[in-house]
Amino acid sequence: MKKRNTIKNLPLYLMMVPGLLYLIINNYIPLFGLVIAFKKIDYSKGIFKSDWVGFSNFVYLFKTKDAFIIFRNTIGYNLAFIFLGTIVSIIVGILLAEVTRKTVLKVYQTTILLPFLLSSVLLSYVVYAFLAGDAGLINSGILEKLGLEKISWYSDPKYWPYILIIVYLWKTFGYNTIIYFAMIIGIDKTYYEAAVVDGASIWKQITKITLPLLKPTIITLVLLSLGRVFHSDFGLFYQVPMNNGLLFNVTNTIDTYVFRGLMQSNDIGRSSAASFMQSVLGFLLILGANALTKKIDKENALF
């Protein structure tokens, strides 16, 4: 019977092969490289014969004088990104869905989001076009015409927390909005039709139907985002500020700090240790957040 079922399901097993190969090559084979985090790599000896240094590669991040700054920036920015990004994406998704219900242009609504799906490299040039000292759009096109003094954006750190948050939202909210938009248009229309019959306003429909039904999706995406709290968008924090030393106090994160250290010392053991630590801390954070969610609302927990 088992043999017969195996032969019957053979096409399905064959369909699994590409996905399994991808997981094995990209997710499991690299696990052997975790030993690098516990070694001081000597290229003449190779990875496995290099000297073990235990947890010393992990300690350096916490002993550095910049430890507070890089952890503060990494965690603080990510929490702001998650909070504001979720709010903006939900609002835009709901607005698109409301427009969709009143028109027949169901496909074209999402196309307005495509210009926001920019890579970090392209985005750095766009931001520079806005903030450049003499020729930037804000200085020469707005402040100068209003008779206001030009701002040296790339030498004044106080503006960059706001700039980075705005740029991040500009870059990511399009993709996240599409997810929420797809969930909203999948909600059974009879709920809204019944609400209209009962005299519910659009605001009531959003707060009593849309948001409650979006709750599982919101929780899932937020929980997954928490796993990246100790990581940062390298392009956003390195390329957009142009790796400007004057801005390190507000732009330096774990990823950019490790990259600069790697370029100077060529110590891949420390770099691997930092990446390993980020993944473990993110994993533990997801477990904790999921456990808290399970206590509050068991049905909406990830597992």
Image (spheres, helix red, strand yellow):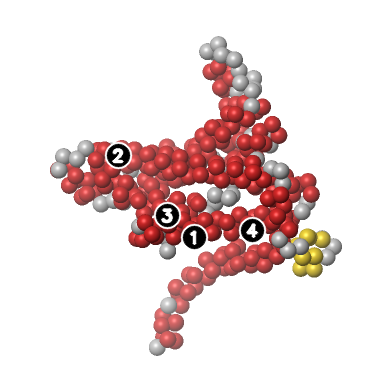
Which amino acid, by three-letter code, is at mark 2? Glu
Horizontal arrangement in the rendering, residue 60 relative to residue 211 (left or right):
right
Q: Is residue 239 visible?
A: no
Helix, strand or loop at mark 1: helix
Query: Residue farthest to the right?
Result: 44
- Contact check, label 2 and label 1, Cβ < 8 Å: no
What secondary structure is found at the residue carrying circle 3? helix
The residue nearer to you, when weighing 260 against 16, is 260
10 Å neighbourhood of mark 1: few (<14), some, or many (≥20)? some
Q: Distance of mark 4 from mark 2, alpha carbons?
A: 44 Å
Q: Position of residue 45 (x, y in %)?
A: 83, 65
Pick whichever of labels 4 and 3 is earlier in the sequence: 3
Q: Which residue has dot 1 on it?
A: 287
Say above or below: 92 vs 191: above
Q: Is residue 91 left or right of residue 153?
A: left
Q: Can you give x and y, in whole percent of width and height, for residue 110 in the image?
A: 40, 42
